[in-house]
Amino acid sequence: MTGSFVERRAFLGNTSLRRLLWALAVLVVVLLARIATESGTIPPSPAAAAPVDYNPYAEIVRLQERLRAFPDDAAAYAGLGIAHLQQAREDGDAAHYQQAEVAFQSALEREAEQLDALVGMGMLALSRHDFAAAIPWAEAALAVAPHKAEAVGLLVDAYVELGRYSEALETGQAMVNLRPGVGSYSRASYLRELHGDTTGAIDAMQMALDVAVPGTEGWRWTAVQLGHLHFNRGDWAQADVYYQAALQSNVAYPFALAGRGRVAAAQGNSDSAIRFYAQAVERLPLPEFVIPLGDLYAATGQSEEAAQQYGLVRVIQRLNQAAGVSVDMELALFEADYGDPVSALQLARQAYAARPSLYAADVLAWALHRNGADDEAQRYNAESLRLGTEDALLHYHAGVIAHSRGDTASARQHLQTALDLNPAFSILHADDARARLTALRESADRRPQTADR
């Protein structure tokens, strides 16, 4: 296959941070299936290498038993580390990262070129948001196995999060050429989305879903991502189809529960939205579930419940920081919206210095705006839109910043784009976008018919 996989025809001829988690989940499933065979925890067979839905806690127990009997089994240590990474996805406990690191290092002490441990260390670095550190681990794995698709995927993820989009495209195409499948198609989807090709992103993610094994966690996650792509362009009904499909596979799947909460909130059914989000938070307390639940409580006049959710976000992020996870960008956006603008700006500058992606530029722009530095904010806002990404929140931030600078024409354009993309893009901000746009139009109608300056 030739051509860039951002170019839909060439790719289909042969297609924030949630996508990163998905990519890691795919790597976990593939690596654990193979490691289980190599380390003797399941009988080797042709079926053993196929992705299966599994219980990471049970995998941890099995591998620990294996290591008690065979303490020098480097592959088992690598599998133990990867199982801890998956367990962190299952229960949200970032303490598993330290246990994963110990296991990977134990594998490498016994076998310096243990391939899955090298890939695992790269996965761990991505999980901790240390994206620059993931690159040398991926390169070390490729030095051992130049055609290791999982290692190539690590490079794609790191380049994206570091804002190195040209390298991400080139490396992503290499991954598609090397191994067309769930991992490469999903990365193609995200890169298309970043470059403003939402239809192409949906096509690619559908291809990923088509080749994923039905009933597995990876299949459920892919279905949810496909739902998000439809939701983000305002097709709430189609999004709900995919969220419900994931729940038919697992009725307690938190990412799908939260997805149904998004749809219910968009449709104005706050009671159902709260119920879905509360179920997701009970199952897996992630900020991406907790924050909209707080927003729903606030929107329905339940201020005490809202404050509890916002307080929980800070607790979760402190625990993540204690486990070695960098959450500067996430906390910066949260503080800019709900807390201390000065703290938000400090965190946003740190995040942008470490990972100058378009989303880091957007967070920095928003934090600058919240501190009254709108001229500087506009420069970073322009950077956040440089790929043509069709993200309503990016355009909302651009509209508000332009409005604050007195650039009413740009403000109207960006606010209208945000609402055209998805009129329910944010529980917190969508109503403000509509109110600002209405005020700008009314103001324009009252002025003499002259061009905006």
Image: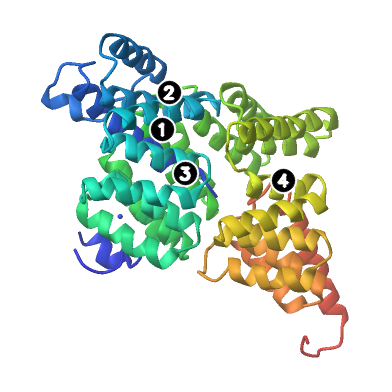
Percent coordinates x, y for residue 196 in the rendering: 47, 65
Label 1 vs label 4, nearer the camera: 4
**SS under mark 1:** helix
Percent coordinates x, y for residue 67 in the rendering: 31, 14
Percent coordinates x, y for residue 135 in the rendering: 40, 52
Q: Earlier in the sequence, mark 2 or mark 3?
A: 3
Label 3 vs label 4, nearer the camera: 3
Q: CA distance from mark 2 to mark 4?
A: 30 Å
User: Quadrant of the rendered structure where residue 120 is?
Assistant: top left
Residue at x-position 29% and y-position 15% = 71
Label 2 vs label 3, nearer the camera: 3
The kind of residue tagged 4 is Phe
Q: Earlier in the sequence, mark 2 or mark 1?
A: 1
Residue that label 1 marks: 245
Q: CA distance from mark 1 to mark 4?
A: 31 Å
Residue at x-position 43% and y-position 25% = 84
Report crowding for label 3: few under 14, some 14 to 19, many 20 or more residues within 10 A (C-alpha).
many
Residue that label 4 marks: 334
Residue 126's mark? 3
Label 2 vs label 1, nearer the camera: 2
Residue that label 2 marks: 250
Q: CA distance from mark 2 to mark 1?
A: 9 Å
Q: Nearer the viewer, residue 5 or 268?
A: 5
User: Quadrant of the rendered structure where residue 360 is?
Assistant: bottom right
Relative to 318, residue 13 above or below: below
The kind of residue tagged 2 is Asn
Q: Earlier in the sequence, mark 2 or mark 4?
A: 2
Color scheme of the displayed model: rainbow
Residue 106 visible to an observer of this rendering: yes
Label 3 vs label 1, nearer the camera: 3
Locate the C terminus and report the quarter of the image it occupies: bottom right
